[in-house]
Image: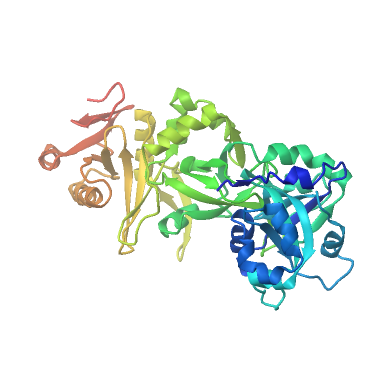
Amino acid sequence: MVGTARLSVTIAIVPIMNDEQLVLQPRGGTRYNGPANFDLSVRRGVRLADHAATLGADLAVLETLYRDEPARIWGSTPTRSSGNAKAVALRGRKVGDQVLFYADMAFFAKATILHLFHNPDLAKSVWGTDEDGDTWEHIMALGDVHEFEVPIPAARILGPLGLSTPLRSLTLVSADKHTSVRDLITAGGNRPPAHWILGCDLDQWDVWSWWESRSASTATLTITRHVDELRIGDRFALWVSGGTAGIYAIGTLTSTPYPVESPEDGATRHVVDVRFDRFLFDRPLTRQALESDPVFADLTTMMSDGAGSVPLTPGQWTPIERTADDRGRTGPAEPAETVVTSRPPGSVPETAIASGGSGSHVVDFPEARLVERYADFVDRELLCLSALLPTGERLVCDLFDPATNTLIEAKASNRRQDVRMALGQLLDYRHHLKPGAELAVLLPAKPASSIIEVLRAQGVEVIYPDGDVFRGEGARIGGSSSG
């Protein structure tokens, strides 16, 4: 919400000062009713008539300031120390000073102090008391209240002032130091949302399990670059690197980066809170698809593994968002729905060493190598589909060809029993994963004609290698040498 309150009497009452200090005012979290209190007494303001009995001599001053308008007021609880930052700010702030309101690692609003007064009765009438029985009795009357369209990351203001994040207390900044950040305050809140690709650190966040958990549409991402530039409201695309490289979700930043300490080793890293509004896990923008489209030609070069966060121009962002709008979904799966995840088929070694009770032995992967050979041959985007059914059962289809809407099951032999199994699997996949999809089996050699007849009778095509090419018995497999 963007709100602006400009009081016509402000200039007449408050002279323009060259010694304007800066008051950094934490709003407080929900535990202290911070959001509700701000909405009540700053954003909307309070009617003086509703609290006239508690105002005493302050009523005449506030009526002069606000006339028939609601009074914009904010209070602070007393401090039991005389030398901390809060005590210094309460003693030193004055009429004409600028106030910056802080919450969630950012400054989200500004105002000007019109009047200062101490009134516990009014504070209790407006805000009540906190859990310790204290009330916000040291009160500022405010004018020129303005909420920034895009909150200013706290580090951009606190850093030049020699202060650290998060802001933990009411703090008074001298007029000289205020001058050093005045332009940032004036311009910072007017910056339009920026656009980013944010990398997913799979060591910090198992994004696949998160997606299959049907969780809420929020998460926390680790940030390693551009920590001071990311702001609330910025738009981003979630990039997963490695063999599954691609864009898997679109969303908005709901915080600025903030430090957290690892419980394992005590190391500090920066994270940012996000909200997703488009999920592409069932149809991601894979690296291969991006590389084959001239519109996205420079994105994969920019987004190398481990790049973390990469800024995008509006021209780079628009086609990503437009393409994402045509695929995926706007929320996580419901409990009764199947959760589908699509990833590029991964690279698999020809052999691997496995250890067992009888010692080490070589494990072969002929089926996976067949999939890899076929993917290289067609030279277009193919996906491996994994589905978690509401029952907890998992289905994994070797390949899906988006260009032909074909589910493909690979087998390591062309024996009848293996082809029968492939046929049953394909019918299962189509029912649960892609209703209406075409079906095909990928075999290491052409099967017997009687097997081909059975498959064709069920509408299932056969794909097999023939030297360096792949041929299809009626299958739309692409490539220049299919038959």
Q: Is residue 240 visible?
A: no
Say whether residue 172 is left or right of residue 189: right
Give residue 150's position: percent from left, percent from top: 61, 43
Q: Nearer the viewer, residue 18 or 28?
A: 18
Relative placement, left or right, of 37 versus 333 is right
- Image coords of residue 279 (percent x, y): 42, 46
Task: Determine the residue located farthest toward the bottom in the rendered image.
Answer: 133
Question: How was the colour assigned to the protein in this rendering?
Answer: rainbow
From the image, which quarter does the C terminus lie in?
top left
Q: Quadrant of residue 188?
A: top right
344 relative to 81 in the view: left or right: left
x, y (%) of residue 281?
41, 46
* 278 and 352: which is toward the camera: 278
Q: Find residue 89 and report its horizontal and vertical position in percent.
A: 83, 59
In this orientation, which residue lies closer to the viewer: 236 or 96? 96
Instruction: Tell me, yes or no, if residue 226 can be seen here.
Output: yes
Tell me which corner region of the image, top left, top right, bottom left or bottom right, holds residue 345: top left
The residue that appears at 45% across and 47% down in the rendered structure is 277
Q: Nearer the viewer, residue 194 or 308?
A: 194
Report the number of numbered marks.
Answer: 0
Residue at image coords 57%, 46% = 2
Q: Please identify the residue farthest to the top as the structure is shown.
A: 480
> Residue at the spot x=73%, y=47% of the render?
155
